[in-house]
Image: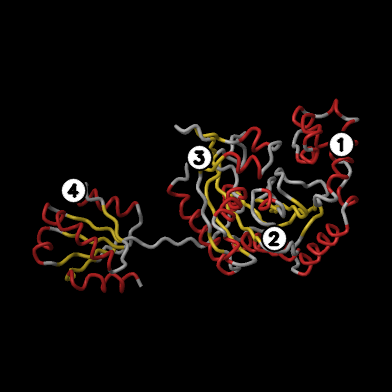
Amino acid sequence: MHDILPQDQPLWEKVRKIMREIADFYNFVRLDTPILERAEVFERAVGEATDIVEKQMFFVQTKSKERLVLRPERTGALTRAYIEHGLSQLGSPFRVYADGPMFRYEQPQAGRFRQFHQIDFDIISNEDDPIYDAQVILVFCRLLEALKIKNLTVAINTIGCKNCRPAYRKELQNYYKNLKDSLCGDCLRRLEINPLRLLDCKQGKCLELKKDAPIIIDHLCAPCHNHFKAVLEYLEELSLPYNLDHHLVRGLDYYTKTVFEVFSQGADFSLGGGGRYDYLIELLGGRSSPAVGWAAGLERVIEVIKSQNINLGIKSKPKIFLIHIGDLAKKKSLLLIEELRKADIAVTESLAKESLKAQLRVADKIGSPLALIFGQKEAFEESIIIRDLKTGLQEVVSLKKLAGVIKKKLR
């Protein structure tokens, strides 16, 4: 896990601000779910044979022996909330987004931590219309473009539906059964339970075997074939660059039909991905409601922004530095700061320091453009000295006129 330090906070806030602007333009509303959820929400939604459920969930022991977990992903939680609060009443399509921390006990590596932050965008509707697949991909790309991340490519595939996938699963099992001796332990175990997960393995030997594995495009039913064809046509109409990745399956059991990941040239990891999950809401007890969405890792996005030296135009409001001299001025300083706050003037101070030189050093270190020198004499006369820290010029101003003079100087 990791700390987000003060110097990185402006960048995190800028990314979130752009996320909110994109969400607002494309009519996504925000929905926040708790960090703690019942374990069965993810065991049923994500799949018991997935890495998340088998290895990566953080369990929380309660006094009443409930099986709770720190949320490892958001789709299961979103689905639970959608059903529990009857959000289908808000109309279709229901466009929803969020960001926040997730928790997975996995091997830390570049851009991946055991506590990490995700941005999620989802569309829940009454139809499995391929236009929504294209729209969520479009929103993802527009967000990354707004963050000035260059050279984006969408890796995309289809994994079929419950009608055509069984035949493909059988084909995969037949292919891998003759290669059991070369499979890693996890893939050997999953061969019977969930053979699609073999295509998601990152172990060296398994990656080589995957190259010759059968592809699902040859086993699609007519509706799935037409759906995928329509998604690609929409992407072409939008001029969004994509690559067909016939072995892309994603690591979660709830996906159906379209799956995708988005990459930026030069980064050896995906910035995020997602797909369609048409059966999940019904599986968890709701009405049949086809859905599609994606999640992006904020740590990964920010790592790419830094590695590409992207300037997002982050501007910090200049802070005026208040210097006090003497007990009376110190006593009146807090009230003076409040008056400046009401006038929307950013001000900082170091009230525990007593000497003028020590306070000026702090003002210089943080780059304040102006210093307000408030001494015993000024406190009695209800005035203050404004010093330009670049030129050294200063003037005495009445406290009543202070806000107006400061704003004029800052302009």
Specify the amino acid type for callout 4.
Glu
Residue position for label 1: 173
Frontmost of labels 1 and 4 is 1
Quarter occupied by residue 50: top right
Can I make out residue 292 in this image? Answer: no
Specify the amino acid type for callout 1.
Gln
Specify the amino acid type for callout 2.
Ile
Distance of label 4 from label 2 (alpha carbons): 57 Å
Q: Are marks 1 and 4 in contact (CB under 8 Å)?
A: no
Distance of label 3 from label 1 (alpha carbons): 40 Å
**Under tag 2, what secondary structure?**
helix
Residue position for label 2: 137
Dot 2 alpha-carbon crowd within 10 angstroms: few under 14, some 14 to 19, many 20 or more? many
Residue position for label 3: 2
Q: Are marks 3 and 4 in contact (CB under 8 Å)?
A: no
Residue position for label 4: 354
Residue at screen point 78% across, 35% down: 193
Picture coordinates of residue 397, whole percent (x, y): 18, 70
Can I make out residue 391 in this image? Answer: yes
| Mark nearer the N terminus (3 vs 1) | 3
Residue at screen point 76% across, 63% down: 130
Picture coordinates of residue 88, whole percent (x, y): 60, 62
**Under tag 3, what secondary structure?**
loop
Q: How many marks?
A: 4
| Mark nearer the N terminus (4 vs 2) | 2
Residue at screen point 47% across, 33% down: 64
The tag on residue 6 is none
**Under tag 4, what secondary structure?**
loop
**Under tag 1, what secondary structure?**
helix
Residue at screen point 54% across, 38% down: 69
Q: Is residue 355 left or right of residue 196?
A: left
